[in-house]
Image: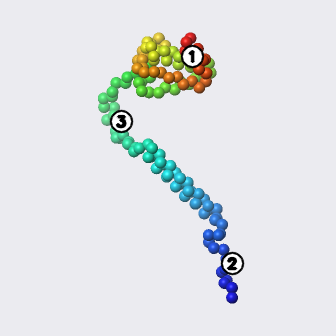
Amino acid sequence: MPDAGADLPTAAALPLSYDQRVAAELTRLRVQREARQLLDAETRGPLILPAAVDLRTHLRTAQPTVAFRVAELQPEGSRVLLAAQYKAGKTTLVGNLVRTLVDGGDFLGHHRVTPVAGSVAILDTEMNAAQGLDWLNA
């Protein structure tokens, strides 16, 4: 006599329902996210948060004097983003700033500049090298 359950598919052979496929994909994405976080943490090192201080205490604490690379415009060790419309004079402004960063003097005739001790690099993604040198020589 043949086995009555021999023709029934096993549980592994049954197609997964939509909800089961969603759950499996969520698990896969969670594993991937956690693995990426662990890898990033290995590269970054431990995250050390500063101590929390209430505003009243912070305002009573003596603040260090800010040293400026360009007086009133750019503190030392900071970054500046220059954005303006087409033909507004960005390249001319940068050229003048670079000259004062290298040679000293006042930026725009008004802001005292502390020259850099090393070199200044210009990364210009709009002009070719020859055109950039022409602008700096002007």
Sequence-wise first label, 2 or 3: 2
In the rendering, at what x and y percent does residue 61 appear?
Answer: 30, 31
| Residue situated in front as seen by the camera: 71 or 97 | 97
Q: Residue at x 63, y 73 (%)?
A: 10
- Left or right of 113? Residue 33 is right
Sequence-wise first label, 1 or 3: 3
> Which numbered circle lies on residue 55?
3
Query: Can the viewer see residue 88?
Result: no
Within the image, what quadrant is residue 123 found in?
Answer: top right
Sequence-wise first label, 1 or 2: 2
Q: Amino acid type of disc 3?
A: Leu
Residue that badge 1 annotates: 133
In the rendering, at what x and y percent does residue 121 appear?
Answer: 50, 23
Discs 2, 3 touching: Cβ within 8 Å: no
How far is mark 2 from mark 3, CA to CA?
75 Å
Q: Secondary structure at mark 3?
A: helix
Q: Amino acid type of disc 2?
A: Asp
Query: Can the viewer see residue 65?
Result: yes
How far is mark 1 from mark 2, CA to CA?
82 Å
Q: Secondary structure at mark 2?
A: loop
How packed mark 2 is, by other alpha carbons closer than 10 Å (few <14, some 14-19, many 20 or more), is few
| Quarter that holds the N terminus | bottom right
Residue furthest bottom in the image = 1
> Which numbered circle lies on residue 7?
2
Q: Residue at x 56, y 19 (%)?
A: 90
In the rendering, at what x and y percent does residue 22 appear?
Answer: 60, 59
Q: Residue at x 67, y 80 (%)?
A: 6
| Residue situated in front as seen by the camera: 79 or 126 | 126
How far is mark 1 from mark 3, CA to CA?
49 Å
